[in-house]
Structure formats: C-alpha cells, structure tokens
Image (cartoon, rainbow, N blue to C red):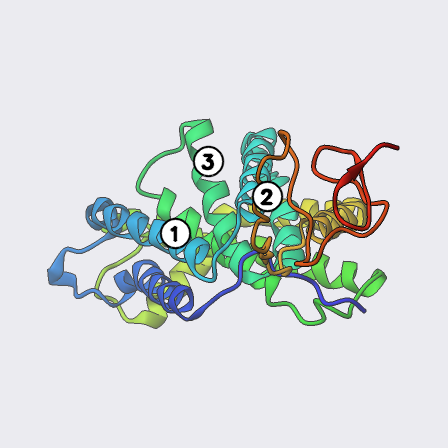
Amino acid sequence: MQRQARAVRIGFRSALVLVLVSAVGVAAFGWPLLAAPESGLAHAQDAPWLFAALLPLLLAVVVATLSDNGVDSKAIAMIGVLAAAGAALRPLGAGTAGIEPMFFLMVLSGRVLGPGFGFVLGALSMFASALLTGGVGPWMPFQMLSMGWVCMGAGLLPGRDTLRGRGELLLVAAYGAIASVLYGTVMNLQGWTYLGGLSTGVSFVPGDPVADNLGRFLVYCLATSLGWDLPRAALTVVLALALGPSVLRALRRATRRAAFDTPVRFADPGPALPAASGAGEGTTAPRGDGPPAPGDKGAAGSLTGPDGNPTTP
C-alpha cells in the first residue's frame, strides 16, 4: 500500500502553536464553569474579548502551518478549493434541523490529507461560510476552532495508509457521527453560558458546583440541541457511506497528481560554450584542441582537408 502524502505537514513550530490555540480554546469553552459567583463573569461579557484573542491565534496557526516545512502553491490551492466547497455546502441546509452537508466533506478531506491540512481546512471553511452567510459574531472563533478539531481528528484516525474499502467507510462514518454530536455539544457549552442568571432549570449559574452546572447543561442539551445534533450525525453517515468511495478516490487521485512529497530539485545546466571567433551568427566553436577531422564542416559550413584548409566539395 502506497503511503498517503501529507499536503500540510505539522512541524515543531506549527505543532507548538496548534497546542497553544487548542489550550486557549479549551479554557475559553470551559472556564465559565469555574467562575466565582461574585466575579460576574459569563460569556455574554467576555465573548468579544475572546473573539479578539482567538481569531488572531487561529490565523497565526494557519500562517505557521502553511509556512512551516515550505508548503507549496499546490497545497494552498487545494485548501482554497475545499474551503470554498465546504463554505458553499453549509448554507444548503439553512440550519434546518441541523442539516449541514459540509461535515462529511470536512471529515473525508481530513482523513485523506492529514491532521495539519484538516485543522487549517476546518478553520478556514467556517471563516469563509460565516462571511458568506453573514454569520460573523463572537461565536465564529469557537466554530472555527471546533471545526478545526473535527477535521484534525479525522486526519488522526488509524490506518490512514493501509485501511481501505468497507472498513474505512465504516470508520469514517462512525467518526463523522460522533464528531457531529460532539461539535454541537461543544458549541452548546459556548452558547449555554448566555443563560447565566436566568431562573430556569437549565440555565448556567456562575459559582455553582461543577457537578450541578454539568447536570443542568446535560438537560439543556437534551431539551434544545439533540434534535439538531442527531440529524446532522445521520446525514453525515448517509453521505459518507453513499459518496465516500467516490470522494475518497478523487481526493487521493488529486493528492497523487499534486505530488506533495516530491522534493523540487534544480539541475545545474553546466558552463556555456564560448562562441567561435569569426563564425556566423548562432554557431559555436568545435570542442577539442586539435584540428578538425577530415570531412568535418568548419565554422562557415565548408569541408576542410587534412591540413585544416577549406576545400571545395
């Protein structure tokens, strides 16, 4: 089995920045559960600051990942094409019952092209779709980070170079279903904190024990978002099983033709030969130090004899 090429390889610098952004993202999603009641902190107040802090970090990950290890224009072009396709697929469901066909494409792309490419693709696809649909707001960096995690996880699935056929389709479909539900759950954690201070049984209460808040959060997910998460997971499974073989073959064929792992070498053309003295335009001096051999043509195109003097043919 031929080893699958990686369009974007994760080097030390990009891995370090990726870990940093992921750590900041985990803190951004989870720290309100640990906020003291007298602090008055909730996502409704800190979201603009997190938006301003997370978006530059995400863009820094993109730049670092693209520049580390010298990614060529072919990988950048493929990222642009797939990000545009994902951004165009997202509005097709129009948010109806969680129908988002972009998930299956993101998962399959991350599977074929690796975790580094997947994280960049997921973040850029969400950014492009937000610009396309007018969904720019404090939630956008959370969506970018979550989709980057989804695509990166697909690139980390086992058997990337060896597993093919039905087994790979089942693996990708199962991961797509789980990732679709987890994506909705993580995004619920970001939006649930806006309910802080409301006197409801599912609202976020700053300063309460973590177990109590998590219990209310579970009820909140079951009551509000499960009807969106399950259809998203079901659609991802259906599309992965129905279109997965064709999409995987197309992505792998494009990856082979792009030859991302092929090093570029420039050959030395060698020293140029000097022009012959007195020769006509476009002629060069004969090689060697001795006289021309009998029957050879001279610089003017006439035959030369053994003594080197021109002779009449």
N-terminal label among 1 and 3: 1
Quarter the C terminus occupies: top right
Which numbered disc covers residue 78? 2
Tell whether label 3 touches label 1 (CB within 8 Å).
Answer: no
Crowding near the residue tagged with mark 2, few <14, some 14–19, many ≥20 C-alpha atoms within 10 Å: some
Task: Report how far apart the C-alphas of labels 1 and 3 lie in the structure.
Answer: 16 Å
Residue lying at 64% horizontally and 59% vertically, measured from the top left: 262
Judged left or right of residue 235, residue 306 is right
Residue type marked 2: Met
Residue type marked 3: Ala
Residue at disc 2, secondary structure: helix
Residue at disc 3, secondary structure: helix
Task: Report how far apart the C-alphas of labels 2 and 3 lie in the structure.
Answer: 15 Å
Provide the residue designation for mark 3: 128
N-terminal label among 2 and 3: 2
- Quadrant in which residue 219 is drawn: bottom left
Can residue 137 be seen by looking at this rendering? Answer: yes
Which one is closest to the eye, mark 2 or mark 3? 2
Pick the residue in front: 233 or 300: 300
